[in-house]
Image: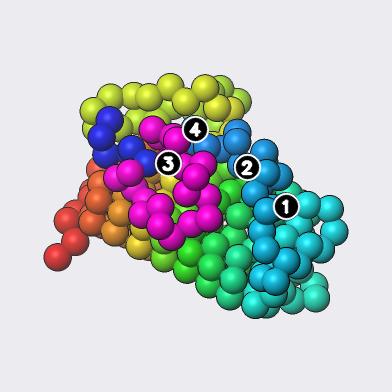
Amino acid sequence: METVLTKNLFDLTHSVAAPLLEKCRYPWEALPLIKEFILQLGPSLPESEFEKRGENVWISRSAVVAPTASITGPCIICAGAELRHCAFVRGSAIVGEGAVVGNSVELKNVILFDKVQTPHYNYVGDSILGFKAHMGAGSITSNVKSDKKLVVVHTPEGDIETGLKKFGAMLGDNVEIGCNSVLNPGAIICRGASVYPLSSVRGVVPENCIYKRAGEVGQRV
């Protein structure tokens, strides 16, 4: 189970959520705790750097938020982040420093590390995206199984019962997701891995590998 440990997927120095994640052996253990973490952290953020807008919404004074963006708390938008036209933040979201939430992108119960890019028509729910992770246009996280059963993470070392009904994907640092790909519930994309466009990904994509299609995963050169 070592491949999917929090410490092996993320550099926690690149997220304000580090105090939450460092307590979690597996990163998805943080998903039910994001809301309460924001509610505790938000009031402690310095007013010189963050402006409180609405109920439980803290936005860095250096963030750029389009007037058409919709933000529901609890939410923290960090320094230099950009929320573009019609971005839709449904709550329990942490958007890291310099991150991009683009046109018609929807976020719900997520942690975006610093420099994450979700720039075009993405849905990211019940997921964590590591430092500089990038989702191509139209790529989404599917966060509920069609049979509504609890999500199981299928790793090379064996299966892990998560106990979660809603669980999208964990993207390690510097992950690249191709356009119009679907990350199925419980997908883990390890550090430095890439996913081809139009892919449907299940299970674990190993570190520094390229996912081309089911059963075809190559090592990055």
Image position of 62 with respect to 218: above or below: below
Image position of 103 with respect to 54: above or below: below
Q: Determine which residue is flagged by label 2.
A: 37
Distance between the alpha carbons at the discs numbered 4 and 2: 13 Å
Query: How many residues crowd mark 1 within 10 Å: few (<14), some (14–19), many (20+)?
Result: some
Which residue is at a point 63% across and 42% down the rendered structure image?
37
Q: Determine which residue is flagged by label 1.
A: 43
Which residue is at a point 71% across and 45% down the rendered structure image?
39
Label 4 or label 3, whichever comes before in sequence order: 3
Residue 195 image point, x, y percent: 35, 57
Say whether residue 22 is visible: yes
Label 1 or label 2, whichever comes before in sequence order: 2
Q: Determine which residue is flagged by label 4.
A: 29
Q: Amino acid at mark 1?
A: Pro
Label 3 or label 2, whichever comes before in sequence order: 3
User: Going by the image, does 52 lie left or right of 165?
Assistant: right
Distance between the alpha carbons at the discs numbered 4 and 3: 11 Å
